[in-house]
Image (cartoon, rainbow, N blue to C red):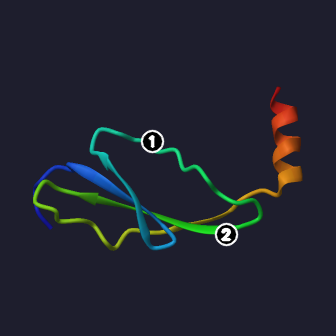
């Protein structure tokens, strides 16, 4: 453990680096997902020296079917 602040975050999708965002960003929009598909996401915090947290949890999500997504959109309007 060190005392360096977070400089950037690495966002992984299914174990592959998807994006690197600045340490001041607290959101990231994932696009291009397929309906009815399971994805695993993980975010690693990194300092300026490139030391990244690798022991954080992953999040597993399953996207909605096209029908579920259409229904959810129509309810929100």
**Where residue 24 appears, x then y in whole percent?**
29, 38
Q: Is residue 65 above or below residue 25?
A: below
Quarter where residue 34 is shown:
bottom right
Label 2: which residue?
38
For mark 2, does the 10 Å Cα neighbourhood hold few (<14), some (14 to 19), or many (20 or more) residues?
few
Q: Quadrant of the N terminus?
A: bottom left
Say what secondary structure mark 1 lies in: loop
For the point 17% across and 56% down, which residue is it?
Answer: 47
Q: Position of residue 5 (x, y in %)?
A: 16, 49
Q: Which residue is mark 1?
A: 27
Q: Residues within 10 Å of mark 1 (few under 14, many from 20)?
A: few
Residue drawn 52% across the image and 44% down it: 29
Picture coordinates of residue 17 (x, y %)?
A: 39, 65
Kindly identify the residue that appears in the image at 17 percent across and 65 percent down: 51
Give the alpha-carbon distance from disc 2 to disc 1, as whole Å: 21 Å
Q: Is residue 72 above or below residue 37?
A: above
15 displayed left or right of 62: left
User: Of label 2 and label 1, which has the lower sequence position?
Assistant: 1
């Amino acid at each position: 453990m060190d005392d360096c602040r977070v400089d950037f975050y690495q966002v992984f999708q299914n174990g592959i680096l998807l994006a690197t965002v600045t340490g001041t960003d607290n959101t990231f929009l994932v696009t291009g997902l397929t309906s009815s598909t399971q994805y695993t996401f993980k975010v690693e915090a990194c300092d300026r020296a490139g030391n990244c947290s690798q022991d954080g949890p992953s999040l597993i999500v399953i996207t909605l079917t096209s029908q579920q997504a259409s229904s959810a959109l129509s309810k929100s309007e």
